[in-house]
Image (cartoon, rainbow, N blue to C red):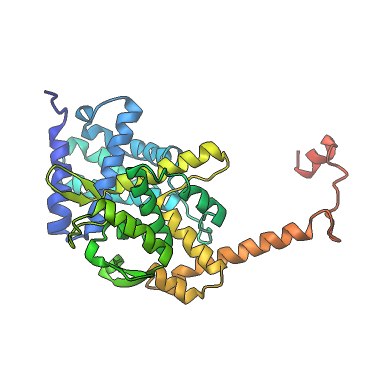
Amino acid sequence: MNKMKDIYFFELIRDYLCDYLPLIRRRSESTIKSSKDTINIFIEYLQIAYSITIYDISIEYFNSKEICSFSNWLIQNKHNNESTVNLRISRLKAFSKYLLQNCSIEYIPQISKVSQVNKFPESKNKMPISLTLKQTKILLSMPNLENKIEFRDYCFMVLMYATACRDNEIRSLKLKDLTLDNDSGRLKIFGKGSKTRLTPILDDVVKILRKYLTQFHPSYNQNDYLFYSSTKKENTKMSNDNSLRILKKYSDRAKEEYPEFPHAYNHLLRHSRAQQLYDANMPLPMVSELLGHSNINTTEIYAQASIEKKKQAIEKVMFNKNSILIKEKRSYKKDKNTIKKLYGL
């Protein structure tokens, strides 16, 4: 039996997640889950970076240098964006404050430096990445619908895209939250801040869901999760890791066939649906309501992205070979000395 090198460190992690955050700080379930996921991913990073097992990890690894390296690893290896990485940094900084109150005095100088780790700068006007309609169709064509698990994955992606719901909102759905009529349906979504909203489902998605329910919910227990992970005792809510694997699996498969296919992740389906609906002239307030945004200002990013696309299209037309606004050819293009002077060399 393997022995933990630093069992006290893992006891502190357990107490932080199971007692301190929920009982003392009274943090929300999503905050606790985000903290747990962050610590788990940090441990995963340490195991990969140092070729060690979880039994070898100790509090010595929890330092500013490793957290900086971890942040870079998230961007380079996990393809996380700056806002996601900054959230991970915030969660580790919060954990460091707890450690300072409970660790041995010898580790205080090391852990106190974690608060000095800077976040990545985020562009305030950064446009959300979204799939085109063609790319969306490619992604959804990747699962083999004759395979039961891949059909499940297909239904999950279709529902997330069609409703523009968040990943956790889809995974939290129970059968009682689903209403299917003859040619339409709706979902009762429990969103951020414990707010509920009704989201429509179109007839083509209803047909897909009916087939899914026949295969995966023959007994139709109202309290069962719509998408679940099977255990020996019961069907539990599908994990975030599992949903991430689903998108990665078919994104990688699409990339094999279409090398230029972008990296796809769960939230990208939500972004893509919202952008496509706005580009198809759905009013911004309606897009905002569909997404469950409490403030329409949050939704305005799709209008900005649409304007940017129009600008790029105009520029493409203005400067093509048939345009009267032909760009002037640079006569110095191959003149090295002139180029050096232009750049102050």
Residue 308 place in picture, x, y as percent:
62, 62
From the viewer's perspective, is residue 290 above or below residue 271? Answer: below
Q: Is residue 135 visible in the rendered structure shown here? A: yes
Residue 324 place in picture, x, y as percent:
86, 61
Give the position of the C terminus as an image quadrant: top right
Residue at x-position 39% and y-position 36%: 69
Residue at x-position 54% and y-position 38%: 257
Residue in the foreground of this view, choosing between 275 and 80: 275
Residue in the foreground of this view, choosing between 307 and 42: 307
Asked which quadrant contains residue 207, the reply is: bottom left
Tell whether 250 sits left or right of 175.
Answer: right
Asked which quadrant contains residue 322, the reply is: bottom right
From the viewer's perspective, is residue 185 above or below residue 38? Answer: below
Residue 195 place in picture, x, y as percent:
28, 71
Residue 340 place in picture, x, y as percent:
79, 38
Count of numbered labels shown in the rendering: 0
Residue in the foreground of this view, choosing between 145 and 108: 145
Q: Is residue 115 visible in the rendered structure shown here? A: no
